[in-house]
Image: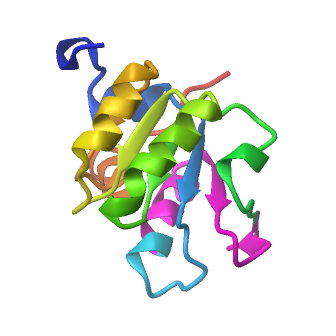
């Protein structure tokens, strides 16, 4: 898939219903908590992926993407760039539609893995801030 065929980040969010957040922190003081909460507050089904807790902000957490029992539209990543390629592989295996690396995170390898799997790809952009700024909400069933 070429970049020209990619939906814009705004289009990706508008088309999505379910966003799995890898590294969703249970600490409200961290951006990896407040940014995903923007998505929750705008109406997306947000699924925390965090192997150290069972729940984040009242949401059932799963230890890995493979454990999520529903289809995933976007995998939103709050982990170091060095972990992005493996997360991209896991997202592809889970059948996710897109891989989204948060602000400050880039990875050529993760981009290639996502492209090879047919996933859309966004990097170095905060999904929560974009949703708030553009007043985006999830797709309706």
Residue depicted at x 55% and y 27%: 139
Q: Is residue 51 magenta?
A: yes
Q: Is residue 59 left or right of residue 138?
A: right
| Whether residue 88 can be seen here | yes
The image quadrant that residue 35 belongs to is bottom left
Residue 11, compared with residue 106, is above or below; it is: above
Residue depicted at x 55% and y 76%: 25
Residue 94, compared with residue 78, is above or below; it is: above
Q: Looking at this view, is 29 or 108 the one in front?
A: 108
Q: Is residue 30 left or right of residue 23?
A: left
The image quadrant that residue 1 belongs to is top left
The image quadrant that residue 2 belongs to is top left
Residue depicted at x 36% and y 51%: 127
Location of residue 61 in the rendering, given as x and y in whole percent from the top left corner: 74, 63
Q: Looking at this view, is 141 or 53 the one in front?
A: 53
Q: Is residue 124 magenta?
A: no
Q: Which residues are magenta?
A: 34-59
Residue depicted at x 26% and y 11%: 5
């Amino acid at each position: 898939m070429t970049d020209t065929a990619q939906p814009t980040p705004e289009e990706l969010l508008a088309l999505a219903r379910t966003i799995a957040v890898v590294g969703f922190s249970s600490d409200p003081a961290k951006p990896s908590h407040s940014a995903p909460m923007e998505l929750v507050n705008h109406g997306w089904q947000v699924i925390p992926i965090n192997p150290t807790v069972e729940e984040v902000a009242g949401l059932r957490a799963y230890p890995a993407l493979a454990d999520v029992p529903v289809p995933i539209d976007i995998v939103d990543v709050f982990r170091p760039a060095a972990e992005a390629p493996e997360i991209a592989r896991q997202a592809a295996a889970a059948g996710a539609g897109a891989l989204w690396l948060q602000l400050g995170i880039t990875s050529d390898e993760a981009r290639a893995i996502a492209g090879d799997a047919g996933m859309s790809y966004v990097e170095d952009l905060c999904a929560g801030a974009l949703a708030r700024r553009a007043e985006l909400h999830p797709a309706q069933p």
